[in-house]
Image: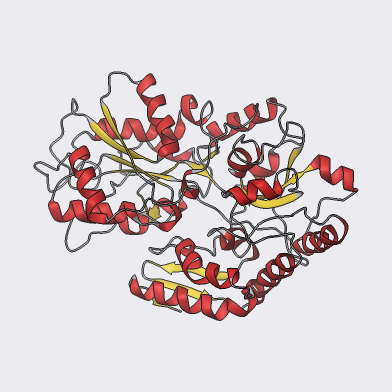
Amino acid sequence: MVGIHTVVHPRRRTALVATALGAATALLALAGCSTGGSSANGSYGFPEATQDTSSTITVWVDADRQAAAKAFEKAHPDTKIKVVTYDGSANGSNSFRTKIQLFDRAGSGWPDVVFSSQNNDASWASQKTNGKQAFAAVLDKGLVPKDTLSNFTPGALNPCTVSGQVYCLRNDLAQAVLWYNKSLMDQFGYTVPTTWEEYQALGQKVAAEHPGYIVGTQGDAWTPEVFMWGSKCQANDITGPTSVTVNTDSTECKRAATLLDTLRSDGTVPNVSVFTPEFVKNYTGKVLMMPGPAWYAGAIFNNAQSLNVPAGQLAVAAPLPWKGEDKAVTGNVGGGTWFISSHSKNLKAAEQFAQFVTTADDYQVNVAPGYPAYAPAAQKWIAKQDASKYYATPLQPIVTAASQVWDGWGYGLFSQEAVWAKTMTPAITGGKNIADLLPTWQQAIENQAKVNGYKVN
């Protein structure tokens, strides 16, 4: 199969079930690096451990990021690394933070580099807790070259930036676009919609004329990141370090909810997760359209374990605007981040690793399944995918969408996916309409925000 490598995106895997203490104890044994002696004023804007450039660095990755570690080992055989696999905080499991809190209490055990599938980890990893040194190293005070940071796609490092300082590097971008099957669209005589209203109307038409075919799904925890975020629903507007505005009673929230309710009721946007056997069994060959992130290409469509869409059928269109709006916006579904530990005893090797896995062609262009956050690699990645002849249309809409992520949906301490999964998913599965559940969602977000110390507006 040509095109994007057929690996499932990390944040969509089921979170590992284990007690925090048990998991952390195992990682303590594996990680084993400690601060040793720390200088009060480090060279890069944070207290540094006594450095040992010959020491082994410990790297935490999820299952799919093992390929990044292998690519690094091949390119840098003289740098010693120990790779530890964990769940990557998938689906808002918060395992990254939980384990680091245990290491903070123990005073040792921190890994040198960590991959997380979440985009909100900088909000806590950049902060001192109970007087303890912040886990995340400051990257833009000389640790990572300015030329490297400036070459990330504009806006890509926003989730990594807290109070004007950069604390992580983005792995890939997860801007949502409109995927569609060009062969089926041509066969049915349909035109690709250019607004959300046209999308809804076409979904209703498909239900009547081609029952069993679908135009999307809404059974995953990131559903609000595709539809609500893309509708400028102000459910997650982080307005300051400890403040958030939540308003699910807006027109923008209600229109997206109504669209989802309407298309779920007629069966064209079913309440099913894309990573279930049910989805593959019922909808292989029957996905007409699907709004979703860039990584759907390799994780869902060009994947022998999923839909396995043949070459020459899959196409992509730009994010959809709502009628009357001049410019479309889109949501962001993941993307992944890499952190360097401020406790690392080998910052040189840790930085070398983090820079390699986010910028080097050996990984980001040749191996990585998603759209690279690093702009030079992204250009080559797109060219490689287009040259594969797998896609029925050029992938330029993905490039365009990278700069259309709406900035009214922020990156706070709490996971919106976790809130949706706990509060909304069971109610929707039980037959309730999202439009009727908007006040419930509002209250759940407010409660979670307050638990994490936010003032809710």
Q: Residue furthest right?
A: 189
Would residue 389 appear left or right of 69 to someone viewing this image? right
Q: Position of residue 387 (x, y in %)?
A: 69, 25
Q: Position of residue 397 (x, y in %)?
A: 69, 44
Would residue 2 appear left or right of 33 to someone viewing this image? right
Residue 383's place in the image compared with 413, above or below, is: above
- The residue lying at 40 percent from left, 53 percent from top is 161
- Which quarter of the rendered picture does the N terminus lie within? top right
Regarding residue 249, the answer to whether it shows in the image is no
Q: Position of residue 432 (x, y in %)?
A: 62, 76
- The residue lying at 43 percent from left, 40 percent from top is 149
Q: Residue furthest left?
A: 37
- The residue lying at 58 percent from left, 55 percent from top is 273
Q: Name the one closer to the observer, 363 or 134.
A: 363
Would residue 76 appear left or right of 261 to someone viewing this image? left
Would residue 192 appear left or right of 167 to someone viewing this image? right
Regarding residue 385, the answer to whether it shows in the image is yes
